[in-house]
Every structure is written in structure tokens, then in C-alpha cells.
Image (cartoon, rainbow, N blue to C red):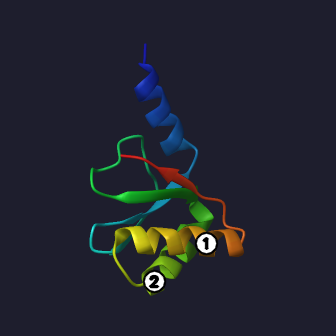
């Protein structure tokens, strides 16, 4: 039997949940699928797989440190009606 953690990980991956992640220097990476384990030090926003490239492109235009870029991404996503969820490592 799968543990609750393993089941959640499997669900996220099979549901097509993607993520745009921001590193400590403001660098942006898009992941087509994301599981439950987020690497430490990243700020990640889960989104629909169809939106991940667009969200990452918007994030790459933002300037500043990790917190500044994350704030800008949240505002841009809201303005453009892109549904995101902040993932916590």
C-alpha cells in the first residue's frame, strides 16, 4: 500500500501539474511535471501544464532577488488569470 506522501506524489505527477521555480538569484526554471518533493531553496509555483511555459517566460522578464521575482510572478499571474499555487519546500 502506498503511503499518503507517495500517493500525493503520484497524483501530482499523473494530474499534469507543472511548476515554475525561482532560485536564490532570481533564475527561473520551468518543470513540465512536479512531484511532492521540491528542492530546498527554490520558490515554486504550481500551475497547469498548459501555462508553465508562459508563466516561466513572464518570470524571466522580472528582475531582482528571489522574493522580488516571486512577488512579481504572483501579480502577473493574477493579472493574466493564470492559476498558481505556491509550493513550499
Among the 4 quarters of the image, the one containing residue 28: bottom left
Pointer 1 and pointer 2: residues touching (CB < 8 Å)?
Answer: no
Crowdedness near tag 2: few (<14), some (14–19) or many (≥20) residues, C-alpha within 10 Å: some
For label 2, the residue is: 62
Circle 1 SS class: helix
- Give the position of the N terminus as an image quadrant: top left
Q: Is residue 47 left or right of residue 64?
A: right
How far across and down, in percent of the image, does residue 75 sit?
61, 72
Specify whether residue 32 is in view.
Answer: no
Furthest-top residue in this view: 1
Among the 4 quarters of the image, the one containing residue 23: bottom left
Q: Residue at x 50, y 58 (%)?
A: 45
How far across and down, in percent of the image, does residue 85 sit?
57, 53
Q: Residue at x 44, y 36 (%)?
A: 9
> Nearest the camera: 11 or 44?
44
How far across and down, in percent of the image, does residue 34 sit?
44, 50
Crowdedness near tag 1: few (<14), some (14–19) or many (≥20) residues, C-alpha within 10 Å: few
For label 1, the residue is: 75
Amino acid at each position: 500500500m502506498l503511503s499518503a506522501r507517495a500517493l500525493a506524489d503520484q497524483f501530482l505527477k499523473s494530474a499534469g501539474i507543472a511548476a515554475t521555480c525561482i532560485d536564490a538569484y532570481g533564475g527561473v526554471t520551468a518543470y513540465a511535471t512536479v512531484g511532492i518533493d521540491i528542492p530546498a531553496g527554490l520558490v515554486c509555483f504550481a500551475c497547469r501544464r498548459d501555462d508553465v511555459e508562459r508563466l516561466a517566460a513572464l518570470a524571466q522578464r522580472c528582475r531582482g532577488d528571489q522574493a522580488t521575482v516571486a512577488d512579481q510572478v504572483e501579480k502577473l499571474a493574477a493579472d493574466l488569470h493564470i492559476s498558481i499555487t505556491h509550493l513550499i519546500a
